[in-house]
Amino acid sequence: SQTIHQWPATLVQPVGSPLSLECTVEGTSNPNLYWYRQAAGRGLQLLFYSVGIGQISSEVPQNLSASRPQDRQFILSSKKLLLSDSGFYLCACDSYTGELFFGEGSRLTVL
Amino acid sequence: AQSVTQLGSHVSVSEGALVLLRCNYSSSVPPYLFWYVQYPNQGLQLLLKYTSAATLVKGINGFEAEFKKSETSFHLTKPSAHMRDAAEYFCAVTGNQFYFGTGTSLTVIP
């Protein structure tokens, strides 16, 4: 089955600084990949999904961007962080059995 | 369009009591339905899924859910709560993408 690695696990950044969160997937090829965000005490918000290298769909206009430079690599970025970007970011990929597999998450605190 | 509604953002049960977490779905096509669990500061882990086979689905950790088309429901149950069941639970339905509910936080009282 798939394994998803996310890093860093925890990040504290000042407002206005850049961001790069990385996600890599093992155990599958050509997966659909997703970035979700959880704000404190709230549900999952789909930010981006990708069906292939260089193919990114954005669900919510915002301060963030995503890239997929390789088949099993998905990167979430920002040029200038806002306070509202704080949250728990989850990378996920789908599987041939229909479910989503999730990484362990990256907790971002913007100060 | 697909969507799910989880009734009750917070549920508290005593250890050993029945756990019932509610999920109602809306789908224009036969749905695939899922329950996920999230422990603090971790990703989501699949508990169980319904994919149009048996309507009573058994999952990990003693949880099960029953698909009821007439009620458009997919409630999650466990006969006897354990302290380790305290977590956030998410119901989800698939269409062209996954649609998650807003989650239910389960507290287990010793």
Image: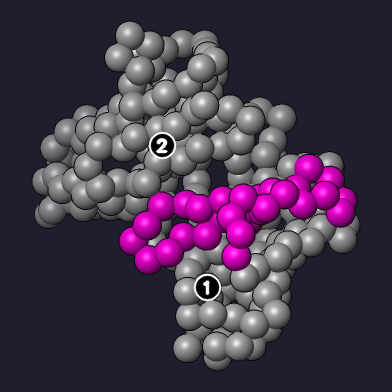
Q: Nearer the viewer, mark 1 or mark 2?
A: 1
Q: Position of residue B23 (x, y in %)?
A: 33, 31
Q: Is residue B110 left or right of residue A13?
A: left
Q: Is residue B97 left or right of residue B90?
A: right
Location of residue B81 with respect to B33 vertically, above or below? below
Who's the residue at 37% across and 57% down the image? A42
Are the residues under badges 1 and 2 in a single subunit? no
Who's the residue at 41% across and 36% down the image? B91
Q: Are marks 1 and 2 in contact (CB under 8 Å)?
A: no
Out of B8 and B3, give the one closest to the viewer. B3
Location of residue B90 with respect to A83 vertically, above or below? above
The image quadrant of residue B66 is: top left
Crowding near pointer 2: few (<14 within 10 Å), some, many (20+)?
many
Please, what is the dominant secondary structure of the magenta stretch?
A: strand
Out of A68 and A5, give the one closest to the viewer. A68
Point out the stretch of residues depicted in magenta: A34-62
Q: CA distance from mark 1 to mark 2?
A: 25 Å
Residue B49 seen by the camera:
no
Q: Position of residue A88 (x, y in %)?
A: 50, 66
Say what amino acid the circle numbered 2 marks: Cys
Out of B71 and B40, give the one closest to the viewer. B71
Location of residue B86 with respect to A51 vertically, above or below? below
Say what amino acid the circle numbered 1 marks: Asp
Please state the chain letter of the residue tagged with numbered disc 1 in the rendered image: A
Q: Position of residue A96 (x, y in %)?
A: 71, 30
Q: Which residue is mark 2?
A: B91
Q: Which residue is mark 1?
A: A85
Who's the residue at 19% across and 46% down the image? B11
Residue B61 seen by the camera:
yes
- What secondary structure is found at the residue carrying circle 2? strand
